[in-house]
Every structure is written in structure tokens, then in C-alpha cells.
Amino acid sequence: VDVTWDGVTLHATPGHSSYQWHNSGQGIIGATDSTYVPSSNSGYSVSVTDDNDCGSTSSVYNVTDVGMSVTDAGYLSGTVYVYPNPVGNRLYIQSPVRVNIQLSSVDGRLLMQQADVQEVDMGDFADGIYLLRITNKSGLVIRNEKIVKRK
């Protein structure tokens, strides 16, 4: 099985009957799809099984640009912080530059898109996992975050 990275999501070779993603060799609870959105820089691998119950594990893929530093012309560089996570009602975004967000469901449906954001009202969303993409004013992705919503 091979692992590829598109800057947001890790992708395993499709067509297997089961998947289990690992972070530094430890199984990630609930990460049992052919794709996985990492929330931290680390070494990731995936174990797969086919219909004949034959298994394989990928090589480790080192993700190094989750939560990368932000640089933007005219601004000092810094780090974008997203908190609290898990979130109840309000999610806060601290950044040295103005940011835009896209909030999606885990199946990729766009649920919210806002410009110049410092906080996100999550109160009307059901408990679950959401994907948050943060971009600068030019549309450059500066952070992707897996958000857990709990009441």
C-alpha cells in the first residue's frame, strides 16, 4: 500500500476492504478510511486488508507542514492557533494576519465559508468531527485542522 499527501489529506491506495491509520506506530482511534487528515506533524502509516484477508502496512510518511508558520507580505510571521479543540460553542482563531475559513464535514461537504475570521460559532452544529481550512487573504492554505465538536 502506498501513501500520498496532498497538503491536507493523507491518501492510501484505494480498493482495500479495511484501513487502519497509525501515528508513530500507534493506531489512531476511528481512522479507518482510505484517507486521513492529520492534526499534527508526525510519521503516519496505514495498514490495509483485502477481501482475501491479506494485509500490508505502508512505509511511514512524515508530515511536516501541519500548523506551519504563517508569512504574509507586510506582516510578521507567526503561528496560527485554533482553540479550544474539542469545541463546545465558540472556536477561536488567533493569527498575526487576517484569515479566511472553510468548514467542511468529514465527507467533504462545505458547511461554512467566512472571511476575516477570529471566531467561529459552532453552536448549531451536531457533535462530530469537522475539517477546518484556514487561508490567508490571497487564498494560500496556512493551516488545516480537524475539529471535534462536543456539547
Image (tube, helix red, strand yellow):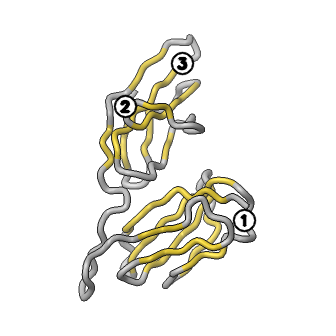
Seen at 45% across and 31% down, the residue is 26
Residue type (three-letter) at the residue carrying disc 1? Phe
Mark 3 Cα shell of 10 Å, populated few (<14), some (14-19), many (≥20): few
Seen at 38% across and 67% down, the residue is 141
- Identify the element where label 3 is drawn: loop
Q: How many marks?
A: 3
Quick one: quadrant of the C terminus?
bottom right
Residue behind mark 2:
2
Seen at 42% across and 44% down, the residue is 10
Quick one: quadrant of the N terminus?
top left
Labelled disc at residue 125:
1
User: In the image, which is nearer the foreground, mark 3 or mark 1?
Assistant: 1
- Identify the element where label 1 is drawn: loop
Of 53 and 44, nearer the camera is 44
- Classify residue 92 by image quadrant: bottom right
Seen at 57% across and 37% down, the residue is 29
Residue 119 location (% of width, % of height): 56, 78
Residue 78 location (% of width, % of height): 30, 74
User: In the image, which is nearer the foreground, mark 1 or mark 2?
Assistant: 1
Residue behind mark 3:
50
> In the displayed image of the protein, which residue is found farthest to the bottom?
74
- Classify residue 104 by image quadrant: bottom right
Residue 58 location (% of width, % of height): 37, 27
Residue 55 location (% of width, % of height): 47, 16
How far is the residue under mark 2 from the one under mark 3? 14 Å
Residue type (three-letter) at the residue carrying disc 3? Asp
Mark 2 Cα shell of 10 Å, populated few (<14), some (14-19), many (≥20): some
